[in-house]
Amino acid sequence: MAAFRLGHSHGCRAFECDVKLSADGIAFLMHDTTLDRTTNGCGVAGDRAWAELATLDAGSWHSAAFAGEPIPTLAAIAGLCIATDSLLNIEIKPTPGWEVLTGQRVAAEAARLWAGRTDLPLLSSFSVDAVAAAREAAPALPRALLIDALTPDWFEQALALGCVAVVADFVLIDAGWVERLHAAGLLAMAYTVNDARVAERLFGWGVDALFTDAVDRLPSA
């Protein structure tokens, strides 16, 4: 939550987060499969019940200023985004083996949290199975395919999943890649761009949005 508030203070009005499921089915924010790197817990995050996860310190790993920062639920982040008129990209980040269930549950929860609103979240994942499950559970929510390699079928997969966007590692992108997506009516997005010169080049090629950690150094619009 502190990271979202800090980004908002720098003018950001669109955010991205990774979401997985606790052992008892609560959608919560966590990038890694395990708790060890970013919390004072250990082991596979998805093996823990939410009551345990909620007690962990998820801020001290970064710096003393954020000591005691808890792991947020998707519901908490939704409330913050809605209250601040901010958009959200939810990356579905399943615990290995939970791809379909996580896609279904996260999509259904997002649909509930943003019910009746027009500023719907974008659901994305590297897992084709998770995106397909999200489509089945909440077909009205927009979807994106995340890619870290230009496999032979990445474009066809995005079309088959009914995606509105493809999000790629910026090192994979060139002007032709952007043109191909735009010709198909899809948005072209890039991650993770922390250099203003790289951002300028990507926008020059027509990239529609980029993901950055450098909210204090890159312009927010």
Image (cartoon, helix red, strand yellow):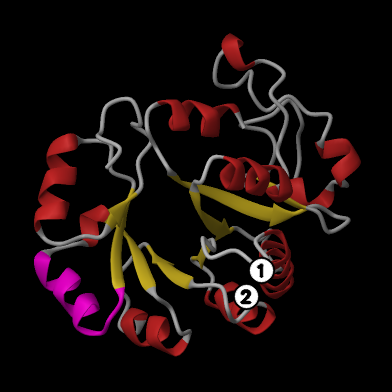
* Residue 208 in view, yes or no: yes
Dot 1 amino acid type: Ala
Task: From the viewer's side, name the closer residue of 54 and 121.
Answer: 121
Disc ID at residue 107? 1
**175 lies left or right of 159:** left
Mark earlier in primary sequence (1, 2)? 1
Where the C terminus falls, by quadrant?
Answer: top left
Tally of numbered tags: 2
Q: Which x, y percent locates residue 142? A: 50, 72
Q: Is residue 106 above or below residue 152?
A: above
Q: Main secondary structure of the magenta part?
A: helix
Q: Is residue 180 magenta?
A: yes
Q: CA distance from mark 1 to mark 2?
A: 5 Å
Residue at image point 45% right, 84% down: 162
Hey, which quadrant is residue 61 in on the image? top right
Residue at image point 49% right, 46% down: 86
Q: What span is colored magenta in the figure?
A: 175-186
Q: Is residue 15 magenta?
A: no
How busy is the neighbourhood of tag 1: few (under 14 within 10 Å), some, or many (20 plus)? many
Q: Is residue 95 above or below residue 161?
A: above
Residue at image point 88% right, 37% down: 52
Mark 1, secondary structure of its residue: helix
Q: Find disc 2 in the rendering and name its residue.
A: 134
Task: From the viewer's side, name the closer residue of 204 and 145.
Answer: 204
Dot 2 amino acid type: Ala
Label 1–label 2 contact, CB within 8 A: yes
How busy is the neighbourhood of tag 2: few (under 14 within 10 Å), some, or many (20 plus)? many
* Residue 31 in view, yes or no: no
Q: Which x, y percent locates residue 164? A: 39, 75
